[in-house]
Each structure stands twice: as structure tokens, then as C-alpha cells.
Image (cartoon, rainbow, N blue to C red):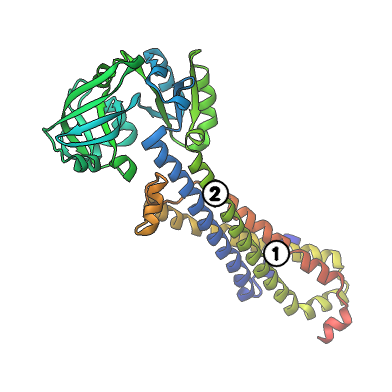
Amino acid sequence: MYLLLSWRNIWRNKKRTLIVASSVFFAVILATVQRSAQTGSYSYMIHSSAKMFTGYLQIQQKDYWEKRSLDKSFKLDTQQLARIKTIPHVTGFAPRLQAFALVSHTTQTKVARVVGIDPQLEDAMTGLKNRLQQGVYPQRTSSKILMAEGLAKMLQIGVGDSLVLYGQGYHGQIAAANLPVGGIVKLPFEIMNNGMVFLPLPLAQEVFSTGKRITSLPIMIDKTRHLKTVLRQTKLLLHRDQTIMTWDKMLPELKQSIEFDNISGIIMLAILYIVIAFGVYGTVMMMMAERTREFGILISVGMRKTKLLIVTTLETIFVAFLGAVVGMLGSLPIIYYLSNHPIHITGEAARIYDKLGIEAIFAFNNDPRLLLSQALVVFIIALASISYPVLFIRRLNPTEAIRD
């Protein structure tokens, strides 16, 4: 009886019900879009940096990260690779041999990061082949190299020219080579585009005299939330001389930037929730004021205040639930569109993103749990407004209410 009476009551005055439901509806949409923008941007920042720099996880020899020396490289274990590939949520890996060397062409000389890569695995992880501007993407057995576009312009070198490389190899050996340029790639970040050279992994191992050794094995996963699960399973496959690092340990500046922005975002979201709470509460106050005479008559003819409280509470729950559900459904197409059409940032803001090593894209999160959580929060805020009808009815004087 209470449920039926409450449902009929909320549709006696359709305008009033639509006002309350609409306030909850727009509150859910605003909160969902704001949180989707925050979490989506964070996930994209992490993915973008992990994809191009470190991976979500990275296997290294112990002490490599502190010294960054070829002497702290390790032999690539094919059985270990096969086991890592079978771990759920692992989407790829790319063995690398990284070192620094002097590179020169004619009279121009620069210091560059030289990276030995498996061309196919690297392309699957970073999409390096799609960034090719000139020339041909190398095969694993190729003797030609890839150069970043910015560095190629500085050295005034093109496809078909030879690059002189000079540096220190494994255990202090001299690393020197005269290598033909097979292709030029345009990298997304200025710091990379102005200072990177890619060699097929066997060629890099020969130039730096490392044998079958690599300096790191970056690993990519499908979702950031699966990081701990993959980390736990990967640790079981490590050799005694190996360690594993997560993206937040290798990119502390990015982690701090995300944490600081997240705090400010939560504060803004809290302010939005407060505005929502006052809006819903004010609407409920208006509803009670409109029905003062009605409540007075009902109490006068013998209806207990307890039963009246139950009915009004159910009315508020119905209206809040209606607004939350419709708001959640209304958020779906908006979030879906924004997640598939991210906002590309330009101008000064884009340069700030570039300095952080992040692609200048404002992405959105389409995780269904985000919609449910924001709808639930707004629904709880709407339910908190039940306190006013409770106090209003308990203090209601039937005689005065009828006169009003």
C-alpha cells in the first residue's frame, strides 16, 4: 500500500516530480563527465608515457636503473619471455638495449640515445612503424638504422647517408660504427625527436659488444587497474639477478603531477556535490511547502505521522532513483562519444604536455563502474534530503497547516 500510494503521489504533480528528477539527472551527468575527464586523462597520460618510454612494468638487472650502464645488462631468456606472454592482461613486450653515444655526420656532432630494438615487437608496443616519414622500416636482420626527425635535421642527414657512431660498449669496450640511415621517424615528444637513434637489436648488440644481452624488457598491459596482478605473477618468473620496476617508480614526476591534479579534481567534485545537495534539498523544501495544507488535513482525519513519513520517504526515494537511473543512461552516449573522440590540445598547453612526455590529448574514461559510482553518490545525496520532510512532518501542527 505504501509503495502504491507513494508512486501515485509523485505523479499527482508531474511538474514538481520532473523538477526534482531533473535536478538529480543533470547532477549525475555533470559529476560523471567531470570524473570521466579526470580519470580518462590520467589513464591516457600513463598509457602514453608507458608506451613510448618505460612500459607499465620493466624487467632489469639489479642496480641498472641507478647506473644506466651496459655492464648491468642481462641475457634474454626465451623461455622467460614465453611465460610472460601467457600472463593474463599482458598485451606485449619489447626487449631493448639502451646506451648513449656521440653521433656525427660531416661536421655536425650530437649526443644521442641509441636504442637497440626488435622492430616487430617495438612496433606492436609503440606503433613506431606508423611514425615513419621517409625510407623503409627495418627488419630484425637489417644493417640500416632509424633516426628521429629532429636529430636528422640537426645533423643534416637523410636516407641513404651514413651516420658515424662512437661510444662505450660492454665492459669498457669501444663502440664505433659507420651505419647507413634506412629511415626517418617523427616521434611525438620533442626530447625524443631531437635525440634518438634506433638500431635493430642484433646490430646494436654487435656494435656495443654485449652478445645476447639487453638492458631492459618493458611490458605493456591492457588496463592500469591490472598492474598489481601482473606484477605479482611476473615476479615469480624473475631470475636472481633481475628486478622489476613499475611505471610510477620510473616516472615519479608524472605520478606526482597526476596525484596533485587528482586532489584538485576531487575538491572541485566535492564543491559540485555540495551545489547538487543544496539544489535537491531546496527542491524538496519547496515540495513540502506546497503540500503543507494537504499534510495538515491528512493528520487531522487520523493519519499517523509515522505513516505519512514512510510515504514521503518513499516518494523521495522514487524520485531520486528515477533521476539517477535516467542520468546514468543519459551519460552513456555522452561518455561514449567523448571517449571515442578525445580532445586534441594545442598551443601553450600542448607544450606543457610535451615537456612532461605526454601526448597532448584530453581523453575520457568510459568504464561502466564510473557511471554507477557517480549515479550512486548523487542518489545518496538525494536521499540525504529525506531529513527535511522528517523534521517538517514531525513538527507539523495540523491546525496551523490547514489555515495556511
Quarter holding the C terminus is: bottom right
The part of the image, by quadrant, that contains residue 402 is bottom right
Can you identify the residue that label 1 sits on? 316
Q: Is residue 183 above or below residue 188?
A: above
Image check: 167 left or right of 388? left
Q: Closest to the observer: 284 or 273?
A: 273
| Element type where label 1 sits in the image | helix
Depth check, mark 1 against mark 2: the one in front is 2
Q: Closest to the observer: 100 or 306?
A: 100
Image check: 27 left or right of 237? right
User: Can you tell which mark lies on residue 53?
Assistant: none
Can you identify the residue that label 2 sits on? 370
First in residue order: circle 1 vs circle 2: 1
Q: Is residue 189 visible?
A: no
Badge 2 amino acid: Leu
Image check: 40 left or right of 162? right
Residue 53 picture location, percent across and down: 38, 35
Neighbour tally class for label 1: few under 14, some 14-19, many 20 plus, Cα within 10 Å: many
Badge 1 amino acid: Thr
Q: Residue furthest bottom?
A: 403
Residue 32 picture location, percent across and down: 53, 56
Q: Is residue 46 above or below residue 392?
A: above
Residue 354 picture location, percent across and down: 37, 48
Q: Is residue 306 above or below residue 145?
A: below
Q: Residue furthest left?
A: 160
Quarter holding the N terminus is: bottom right
Residue at 20% from the left image edge and 20% from the top image edge: 141
Residue at 50% from the left image edge and 21% from the top image edge: 243
